[in-house]
Amino acid sequence: MPVDVDNGFAKLEALLGRRADYIREPQPGNAPAVAVGRFPSVKVGLFRRFRVPVADRFVYITSGMSSVPMQIPAEEAAIYPPQVELIAYCRGAYVGAHDGQDMVSGYLQALAHMPFNTEIFFGPMHTAAVEERICPDSEMRAFFFALPDGIEMGRLCACTPAAQLVLSVMPITPSEREFAVDRGPDRLVELFAKRNVPNYFDPFRKSAV
């Protein structure tokens, strides 16, 4: 959609130091109503770099997921906050060659609805599998949820409707998800660090496992 002056992302635009160049509107009939903003990378000078977080990356973030709490099992309620938003870092925008749709915003919106349509919830170090490859020529069939770097969490949450935490979303392969389930998500994070795999939404990287 064309970017409106009053697009509901004004606080995030102020925090990130740039305007959203694309907004995926909430889907009619889905609750909570979740929009996704895309903030392009920008070139900044040495001094402005300290005031523009993650300027070298495209940033996608949901708005509206945190307006409704996820259902957290009682035994885990003290560990995982029920109100979250999702964020993803990319080197650029991934737009479908045939349908012209922005892929990352579509997946973030779909993932944001998942806890409210199923009996699951998302927290740091969790994974979620999907039935098919996320796009042609991609090995990715799952997602890994972690914490974003480069932006102070308190300031990020203050720009959302009600988030207590913002989770980063990273596509992973079936073998990487199996590795996390078998050996623990901390080991997967260690493996990514060893292989220099950044916490990016990259549909086309090779598997680390």
Image (cartoon, grey):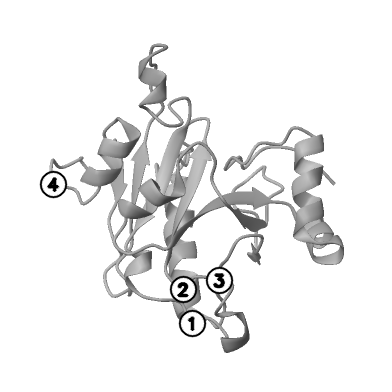
The answer to the question of whether label 3 and label 1 lie on touching residues, with beta carbons closer than 8 A, is no
- The numbered mark, 4 or 3, whose residue comes first in the sequence reads 4
Identify the amino acid type marked 4: Asp
| Residue at the image point whose x is 21% and y is 52% from the top | 8
Question: According to the image, label 2 marks what residue?
Answer: 82
Q: Nearer the viewer, residue 132 or 141?
A: 141
Q: Do the numbered discs 3 and 2 sit on residues whose CB atoms are within 8 Å? A: yes
Does dot 4 land on a helix, a strand or a loop?
loop
Whether the residues at callouts 2 and 1 have beta carbons within 8 Å, the answer is yes
Crowding near the residue tagged with mark 3, few <14, some 14–19, many ≥20 C-alpha atoms within 10 Å:
some
Q: Nearer the viewer, mark 3 or mark 1?
A: 3
Tag 3's secondary structure?
Answer: loop
The x and y percentages for residue 16 are 34, 35
Q: CA distance from mark 4 to mark 3?
A: 32 Å
Does residue 90 lie above or below 67 as drawn?
above
Q: CA distance from mark 4 to mark 1?
A: 31 Å
Q: What residue sits right under mark 3 in the picture?
A: 80
Amino acid bearing label 3: Tyr
Is residue 20 among the parts visible in the rendering?
no
Residue at (49, 55) in percent of width and height: 107
| Marks 3 and 2, how far apart at CA | 6 Å
Q: Earlier in the sequence, mark 3 or mark 1?
A: 1
Total tally of numbered discs in the picture: 4
Amino acid residing under circle 2: Pro
Residue receiving disc 4: 6
Residue 54, position in %: x, y? 46, 31
Q: Nearer the viewer, mark 2 or mark 4?
A: 2
Q: Tell me the tag on residue 71.
A: 1
Query: What is the crowding at mark 4: few (fewer than 14 residues within 10 Å), some, or many (at least 20)?
Result: few
